[in-house]
Amino acid sequence: MASRTAWVTPEMEGKKRLAPALRPFLGLARLAHAFAEHALRLRASSPLDQVTEVQARLLVQASNQLRILELAAERGYPLQALGAAATLYENVSALAYMHGDASKAAEWFRHTDSENTYPPAKKRATGIRFMLAATGVPAREVEALVATWEDHHTRFCAAKHGNPVLLKKYGVSRDERQLKLHLGPLSGPAYLLLSRMALYHGSRLLADASVLLATPSLNSKGVATRRFKAARRRILNRINQLATVRTLSTSADGSAA
């Protein structure tokens, strides 16, 4: 059995090696966490109904999931980071699916089926559609962007579920004489690209989910509202700056908070 040192030492070495290339994306993730906290504080000033409670619970889980994604990406586990992005996407689509509907929130609390989640997977795109519309995407662009996000989710799930399309190329090298399986962290251009992709899109999803939670309170006046709007400007600027850096695509493909 591998000792703790056999894992930790190469992870710390990988973290140091990856830091320069991942620093802007890890910074974006930190902004996304702070933005989610601003959204929660802003909504805390309003009466708590079931829709808000469900969305707040899901936002917290999405933030936690992004943190797991960060830890995996910065230590050299890009496939695991992408898998975490799949769960994050599902949390955010469920949050967006509530869409101010008290009956959906009530169904969420009544749900007892551990094999099939709520909302069902077939409603995932509906949630993303609500998310895009609520965060300012023009109606004529929504369907194309739903398709783009669903394509991202397909790629995330390929990592999450061990799809051979990824696994037969990941963490392995071979020549005529032997097959080498690489245990522990990995680095290299392709792996770096996967980590950047996970961090960028995961942070954007958390930012958009934060906007959804906060929207009912945006017309209120006070310090929490001003701080939320300032945080929104900061993360929007950072998202747009990083959209020109190679991740999964070469330009922003969604609502950008």
Image (cartoon, helix red, strand yellow):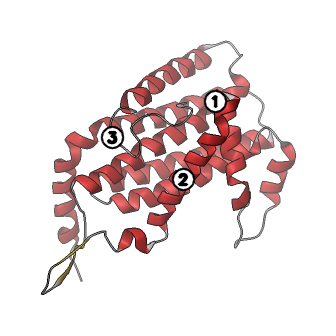
Name which residue type carries label 3. Answer: Arg
| Residue to which mark 2 is pinned | 151
Quadrant in which the N terminus appears: bottom left
The earlier-in-sequence mark between 1 and 3 is: 1
The earlier-in-sequence mark between 2 and 1 is: 1
Q: Number of numbered discs present?
A: 3
Q: Determine if residue 75 is in view.
A: no
- The answer for how far apart the CA atoms under marks 1 and 3 are is 24 Å
SS category of the residue bearing label 3: loop
Q: Residue 101, image x and y in percent?
A: 83, 42
Left or right: where 133 falls relative to 1: right
Q: Which mark is residue 135?
A: 1
Q: Which mark is residue 246?
A: 3
Name which residue type carries label 1. Answer: Thr
Q: Determine if residue 216 is in view.
A: yes
Nearer to us of marks 2 and 1 is: 2
Name which residue type carries label 2. Answer: Asp
What residue is at 64 percent from the left and 13 percent from the top? 222
Toward the top, the furthest residue is: 221
* The one of 169 and 106 positioned closer to us in this rendering: 169
Neighbourhood count class around disc 2 (C-alpha, 10 Å): few under 14, some 14–19, many 20 upward:
few
